[in-house]
Image: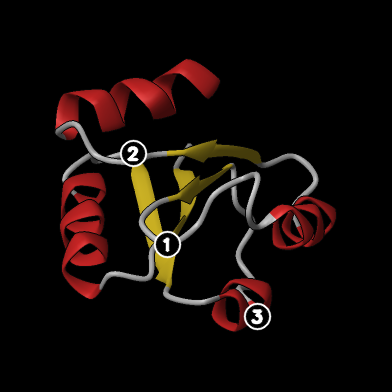
C-alpha cells in the first residue's frame, strides 16, 4: 500500500528537494502545494501532510484545521530541515 503525502512548502527549491527525497521511497507518493490555496484544492487521499518552509501548525492553525477536515485520517507534521534521515524519521514516526 502506498503512503500518500501532501507537502506544503513555499520555497520552490526546498519543495523540489523534499519531493525528490520522498519520491525515492518506493511505497511513498508525494505531491506538493506552495500556498494555502493550492493546499486546500488538493484532492488526494493523504496519509501525511508535511508542513515545510513557510508553514507551521501555530501560524497556520486555520489552514491545518481545514486540511484535517478534508483529510481526517491524515497526520499533520512539521519539518524544518535537518537532512533526509530526519525527514524520513519524522514521517515513519507517525505512520
* Percent of width and height locating residue 8: 46, 61
Tell us which disc is closer to us: 2 or 3: 3
Task: Check contact, mark 1 vs mark 3: CB within 8 A.
Answer: no
Mark 1 neighbour density, 10 Å: few (under 14) some (14–19) many (20 or more): some
**Residue at the image point whose x is 38% and y is 39% from the top:** 79
The residue that disc 1 covers is 54
Q: Nearer the viewer, residue 8 or 54?
A: 54
The residue that disc 3 covers is 41
Residue 14 left/right relative to 55: left
Vertical relation: 27 (above or below) 92: below
Q: Mark 1 and mark 2: span between their CA atoms? A: 27 Å
Tell us which disc is closer to us: 1 or 2: 1
Q: Which one is earlier in the sequence, the residue at label 1 or at label 2? A: 2
**Residue at the image point whose x is 14% and y is 33% from the top:** 83
User: Which label sits on residue 27?
Assistant: 2
**Residue at the image point whose x is 24% and y is 74% from the top:** 12
Task: Check contact, mark 1 vs mark 2: CB within 8 A.
Answer: no
User: Which label sits on residue 4?
Assistant: none
The quarter holding residue 58 reads top right
Amino acid at each position: 500500500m502506498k503512503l500518500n503525502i501532501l507537502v506544503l512548502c513555499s520555497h520552490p527549491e526546498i519543495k523540489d528537494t523534499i519531493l525528490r527525497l520522498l519520491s525515492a521511497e518506493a511505497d511513498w507518493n508525494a505531491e506538493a502545494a506552495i500556498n494555502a490555496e493550492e493546499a486546500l484544492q488538493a484532492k488526494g487521499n493523504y496519509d501525511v501532510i508535511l508542513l515545510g518552509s513557510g508553514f507551521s501548525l501555530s501560524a497556520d492553525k486555520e489552514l491545518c484545521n481545514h486540511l484535517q477536515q478534508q483529510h481526517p485520517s491524515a497526520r499533520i507534521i512539521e519539518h524544518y530541515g535537518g537532512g533526509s534521515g530526519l525527514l524520513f524519521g519524522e514521517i515513519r514516526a507517525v505512520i
